[in-house]
């Protein structure tokens, strides 16, 4: 799979974390952009057309669950992986219910995250065929 | 104080401590995640053969970020340690500004969720009060939390200290539109009793400001 094949958007209010994760994923042949809150992420949906979104839950302004709901409403084909520091089992259930592809806890192993992103992309391709 | 009020006060204190620890651990977990990803990035760069000679600025940027987040972690631990020691003795002399600064640092995360900004306007004389620091922080926390819950996003809350004759005045001034919100407050009878025990008094206008007067005492 070449770099331009998978377009990923990382949404996290911790700028340093989002940027470092982006760099690490870019080194794993993914094309990665960043957004630092939910509103910015939603505004980028039509412009950047991400295949997969890696989404934090607790962010200033819009909560991650609200962002997930809006993403699925606007672009249901986009796959969303929630990456949170404090997610509960209840959160995981809610993410599933809203159509999220995965639920990982911080700090996540980078190889596992990259693998999950690739699996999410495959799912997106299968659904849009 | 009778047993019922004492019990109520303990419950509020437990809730307060829980909230402070939850905010603290969230913050620390984020810093650790950043440090973890940064060291991981250094490892990734080495694996793909990026040499220190050729990519020194990139390596230094990551190292500075790690140092910065270790310093932030340390600062947060200092605040939590000071906060814990406020409970060492029921009455003591302490700098009110320091006590408020510590509370704000530990509560900032909750306010950030609604993009509410704390403004601090403290008397430069660094006033010292003689009171129960843990209970005083609980009272101020309750008013701050109430405002965070009831104010719209992007509001401000100003904390002010001023010295007047024999007392120190702590003023909490909310600035923003009110929304419907459920918040925990200290029942007024209990608040009156506690403030009296602290040797101070309080005047409240939920929409405008809350003023707490405390006895001034040099260290």
Image (cartoon, coloured by chain):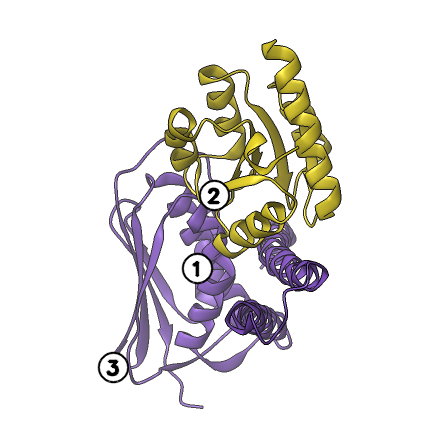
Question: For the residue carrying disc 3, how many other residues have a C-alpha within 10 Å: few (<14), some (14-19), or many (20+)?
Answer: few
Please tell me which residue is depicted at 62% across the width and 52% down the height of the picture. B22
Does B2 sit above or below residue B197? above
Front-most of B104 and B200? B104
Question: Are the numbered discs 1 and 2 placed on the same chain, yes or no?
Answer: no
Q: Nearer the viewer, mark 1 or mark 2?
A: 2
The residue beneath circle 2 is A34
Q: Please, what secondary structure does the residue beneath circle 3 have?
A: loop
Please tell me which residue is depicted at 71% across the width and 33% down the height of the picture. A116
Q: CA distance from mark 1 to mark 2?
A: 37 Å
Q: Position of residue A5 (x, y in %)?
A: 58, 30
- Which quarter of the image is occupied by the N terminus of chain B? bottom right
Tell me which numbered mark, 3 or 1, is placed earlier along the sequence: 1
- Residue A113 sits in quarter: top right
The residue beneath circle 1 is B140
Q: Which mark is residue B165?
A: 3
Q: CA distance from mark 3 to mark 1?
A: 22 Å
- Please indicate whether residue A17 sits to the left or right of residue B216 in the image: right
Does B11 sit above or below residue B94? above
Tell me the chain of label 1: B
Q: Nearer the viewer, mark 3 or mark 1?
A: 1
Q: Colour of chain B?
A: purple
Q: Position of residue A102 (x, y in %)?
A: 68, 29
Q: Please, what secondary structure does the residue beneath circle 2 have?
A: strand
């Amino acid at each position: 799979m070449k770099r331009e094949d998978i377009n990923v958007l990382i949404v996290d209010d911790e700028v340093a974390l989002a940027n470092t994760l982006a760099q690490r994923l870019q080194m794993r042949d993914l094309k990665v952009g960043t957004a630092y809150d939910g509103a910015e992420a939603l505004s980028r949906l039509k412009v950047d057309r991400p295949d997969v979104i890696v989404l934090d839950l607790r962010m200033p302004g819009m909560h991650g669950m609200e962002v997930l709901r809006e993403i699925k409403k606007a672009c249901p084909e986009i796959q969303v992986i929630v990456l949170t520091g404090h997610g509960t089992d209840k959160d995981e259930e809610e993410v599933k219910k809203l159509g999220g592809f995965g639920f990982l806890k911080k700090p996540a192993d980078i190889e596992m995250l990259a693998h999950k992103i690739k699996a999410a992309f495959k799912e997106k391709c299968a659904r849009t065929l | 104080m009778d047993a019922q009020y004492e019990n109520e006060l303990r419950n509020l204190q437990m809730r307060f401590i829980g909230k402070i620890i939850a905010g603290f651990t969230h913050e620390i977990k984020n810093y650790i995640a950043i440090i973890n990803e940064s060291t991981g990035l250094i490892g990734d760069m080495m694996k793909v053969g990026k040499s220190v000679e050729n990519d020194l600025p990139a390596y230094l940027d990551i190292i500075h970020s790690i140092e910065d987040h270790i310093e932030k972690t340390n600062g947060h631990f200092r605040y939590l340690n000071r906060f814990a020691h406020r409970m060492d003795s029921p009455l003591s002399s302490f700098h009110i500004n320091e006590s408020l600064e510590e509370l704000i640092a530990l509560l900032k995360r909750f306010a950030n969720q609604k993009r509410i900004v704390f403004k601090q306007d403290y008397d430069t004389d660094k006033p010292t009060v003689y009171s129960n620091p843990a209970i005083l922080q609980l009272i101020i926390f309750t008013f701050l939390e109430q405002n965070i819950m009831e104010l719209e996003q992007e509001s401000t809350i100003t904390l002010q200290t001023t010295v007047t004759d024999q007392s120190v005045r702590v003023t909490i001034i909310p600035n923003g539109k009110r929304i419907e919100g459920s918040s925990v407050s200290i029942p007024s009878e209990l608040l009156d009793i506690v403030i009296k025990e602290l040797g101070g008094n309080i005047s409240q206008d939920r929409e405008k400001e809350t003023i707490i007067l405390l006895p001034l005492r040099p260290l």
